[in-house]
Amino acid sequence: MLNRRILRIKAFKVLYSYAENPSMTLQEAESCLETSMEATRTLYIFLLGVIPAITGEAARRTEDARNKFNPTEEERNPNMKFVENSLAPLLDQDPDFQKAFGKRKLDWEQYDAFLRSLYESVCSKDWYKEYMSSPERSLREDVKLFTRMFEEEFSGNEALESILEDLSIWWNDDLEYSLTACCDTLRDIALGQRWELPPLFKSQMPSRSRSRKPDDSDRQFVTRLLRTAYSCYGKYSALVADSTSQWDVDRLFVTDIVLIVMGLAEAKAFPDMPLKVTINEYVEISKFYSTPKSRSFVNGILDRLVKKLIGEGEIVKTEIID
């Protein structure tokens, strides 16, 4: 499930916590990393659970309207296409999904106000109206609708972000990635696949190539990355400070220092990793977690220090370095 970009981000966040709290032990850092990684999968499961929840909200709304004292003709004979969608029962009645959802003590019922608001917003959209007016009833059609809901209703939804913030400190910044995972799952279901709890790491997912079996390389990658960054933090952060002597060390942004240390640690821990890939990854991460000027700062200092450490034999790379 987790790719290397998000693994780097999670390791970066843990190292940032260590930079702010130097008493953190390596064992505590690794525990935080493990919790953070598993939290992304939990968020994915929670978001999928909104499908049966909003379907239930629609069913209640429809029944309440039908039981009004003087219902309209439309209320007496409502369009049941959304209420009777075929996707919600697949999740609601799937023992594996319900076990995963219940084990994590997840619950949408307490967020009835959000579900009402979400349903009203969905109903107002042209794509929902087109779905309801189409005579086609199929799993593929239902999947298409809910995929649209994930893509357009959840991204940037302040009410949802507030809910997620209250539920878990680990879900900060994970929403977009988890929504993408949800949409991938819906596409698989549309193709006839049954829901399965996804492996935590991309490298553990079944390969389309019969010659390559799933492995644990992503777990090994992020574990080695964090351990190297943790053990080298003092030495590498001092190098950053020394290489920016024109700056007061107190004026350097901690995020920039941590990103550069992460890049140096990755270059040290993985001789076969192309240097360009490593630098580009941390420059990209800096765009989201640091200042507008950090991109050029991280790029320049990281490139300079890696080449310095290669020259000193501290870092060994198997590629040819220009």
Image (spheres, grey):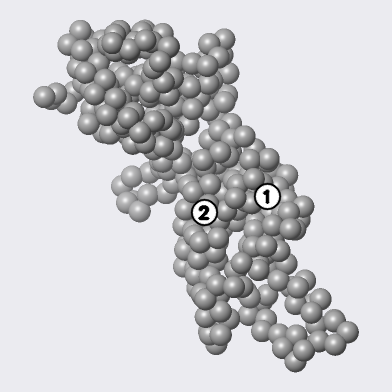
> Which image quarter holds the C terminus?
top left
Camera-side mark, 1 or 2? 2
Q: Is residue 40 above or below residue 259?
A: below
Measuring 57% from the left and 26% from the top, which residue is drawn there?
Answer: 32
Q: How far across and how far down the image is residue 57, in percent?
A: 73, 67
- Using the image as rendered, state which of residue 24 and residue 128 is in the foreground: 128
Tell me which residue sits at (59%, 73%) in the image. 124
Does dot 1 land on a helix, a strand or a loop? helix
| Quadrant hosting residue 109 | bottom right
Q: Residue sitting at 48 percent across and 31 percent down?
A: 10
Is 106 placed left or right of 177 in the picture?
Answer: right
Q: Which mark is residue 162?
A: none
The answer, for residue 270, to whether it is visible in the render is no
Q: Residues within 10 Å of mark 2 (few under 14, many from 20)?
A: some
Residue beneath disc 2: 155
The residue that disc 1 covers is 101
Q: Amino acid at mark 1?
A: Phe
Near-viewer residue (211 or 105): 105
Q: Is residue 274 left or right of residue 123?
A: left
**Kind of residue at badge 2:** Ser
Tell me which numbered mark, 1 or 2, is placed earlier along the sequence: 1
